[in-house]
Amino acid sequence: MTRQIRFLWMFLVVALTFSACGGQPGAITPSTAVPSEQTAPTTVNHPQGGTGPAATTAAQPTTLFGGEDVILGGRDAIGENGVVSTGRADATQIGIDILKAGGNAIDAAVAIGFALGVSEQQSSGIGGGGFMTVRFASTGEVVFIDFRDMAGAGATLDKWEIGENGKVIDDANKIGALSIAVPGEVKGLLYALDTYGSMDRQQVMQPAIRLAKNGFEVSHITSRDIKDAYRQISRFPATEALYLDEDGMPWEAGSVLKNPDLARSLELIAAQGEEVFYRGEIAEKIVAAVQAEGGYLSLEDFARYEIRVMKAIHGSYRGYDIYSSNLPSSGGTIIIEMLNILENFDVGAMDPEGAEYFHLFSEVFKLGFADRAAYMGDPAFVEVPVEGLLDKAYAVKQASRIDTRKAGQYSAGEPKLPEESTEAAGESSAEASGSAPQESASTTSYSIMDKAGNIVTVTKTVDATFASGLVAAGTGILLNDTLVDFSTDPESPNVVAPYKRPLSSMSPTLILKDGTPFMTLGAPGSTRIITGVLQVISKVIDHKMDLQEAIDAVRMHDDFGTLILERRVPETVIEQLKAMGHEVNSGEVWFTFPCIQGCIRLTDGRLKGAADPRRDGKALGY
């Protein structure tokens, strides 16, 4: 089959896929959702007391979300000793196996991280980076590990040709060598293992190595993602050889995809540690592949990369302690700012599927995102007024700007700036600032709790689905396109610069109650991470929902003046919102919203994992 015929065929396939997923009701069911052994509903205590829906129910397709068939049952699980929730059943099982073998939650998190980089490689992997929030049972300390990708020395605006509309010509910051930053995942995961884990590299990496060698089953979602990214995949020979079959066509659901080059790369890392990735054979192959395609990353850039370890951002919401991502992620700060604003309203008395609720959350989101755009960037380059944004008194002022009957548009607020700063408060709105989010929704997140009280949540990414499209020949490693997360506005705090890390929305979050582990959660999905994580937190705390119920619930989003709703919202509610002045998009399908993976400690001390039906999510416990 010639390349031209293959491309025409793929154009038709992608068009039909889009029609089924976005325009017309379709039937898409994740193939990796594993039915629970439990066949009858049971009743359990909710985290806040009382009783409610079954903790684990049998998997069955349920027509929901505006007509799409989505597997709702069988996603959650309860464990006496530990629970794991990830976006892939195979990765979840690997985490459980590590816990059963005597590992702690950190060992499991590292094993899962490497495994997801194999079976969910279109979304994350060792060619990318991310963040980890960890709570250690022995000390009660909460630590945030930043292993976000870093721009190389040559990363400047003049590397891209920028059009009059501010966008990069030919998507050079999204696809190909000029979109790639130095990956941080290997250093981040190995630091966590060496510092807080109890197992060695060989033990935690062997499951991922086996998965890469023996192959994994392609899910419906992975197959769809390959088809959607066909043009960038077929642009690079090493990528094409990996993600297309012998006829040059995308792997279909049920196929087994093997990656022997990635297995060898993982074996090298297991044997030699981070050195081989940042100063050795793997670094040399990645740099050669990037430079061959016109990129500028160098071995010096790789050798310079370091992770950052710091305190997690901390706040409170109605008596619960919230710990989340520090800079360069905006997620933790903006989530807590938004929660602080919500504390000024009786959210629990509102119908979580009513116009009053959607209106309030829409206004809170717009306020938070205006501040995000005006103030936030890599703290090594930009002074960010974090304390001012987190201040409860500031939240009261922000709340007073909301008209509970009418939609508004907001410029950035005026948080207290650091004393040494003489800069004026931001005046621009999120939309006008030039910092409109470029992050992809293609990321992954997972959560673990163990019996000892260790909690880990990780959100990591290669950025866009199939990232830069470039697999470094001989490594099996798909390289990120993280540079697209920078702004092209030279006045933005998030403008690209050498050795800078782009602003992120990734928000791995832990919640404690009276010093005791309560809940952990995170999500992929660009700025929708922030709004999705916040909604689940609120539904559990304000509406006393079971965690799985809160994850399954109707989702919304608003950061640029359009209120985005899942299709399930009734037309009467939509009309009420329009009457309040909202521009409403109510046609969004389920998979465009963030896939939240979380764990919670029940009132009886047992642990529960919950997983999102919007992707291949699955929780397991033991």
Image (cartoon, grey):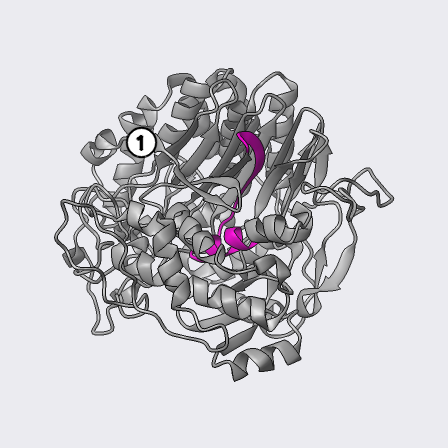
**In this image, 253 relative to 116: left or right?**
right
Q: Nearer the viewer, residue 43 or 525?
A: 43
Q: Nearer the viewer, residue 232 or 385?
A: 385
Above or below: residue 522 compared with residue 575:
above
Q: Nearer the viewer, residue 453 or 289?
A: 453
Residue bearing the label numbered 1: 307
**Where residue 279 sits: x, y (%)?**
26, 26
Residue, far right: 40
**Where residue 278 sits: x, y (%)?**
29, 28
- The three-letter code of the residue at mark 1 reads Ile
Q: Residue at x 53, y 41 (%)?
A: 320
* Marker count (numbered): 1
Instruction: Examine the structure image and report whether residue 593 is included in the region drawn in magenta.
Output: no
Q: Residue at x 75, y 49 (%)?
A: 73
Highlighted magenta segment, given as a residue range: 514-535
Q: Quadrant of the image for the C terminus? A: top right
**In this image, 502 relative to 529: left or right?**
left
Q: Residue at x 59, y 70 (%)?
A: 16
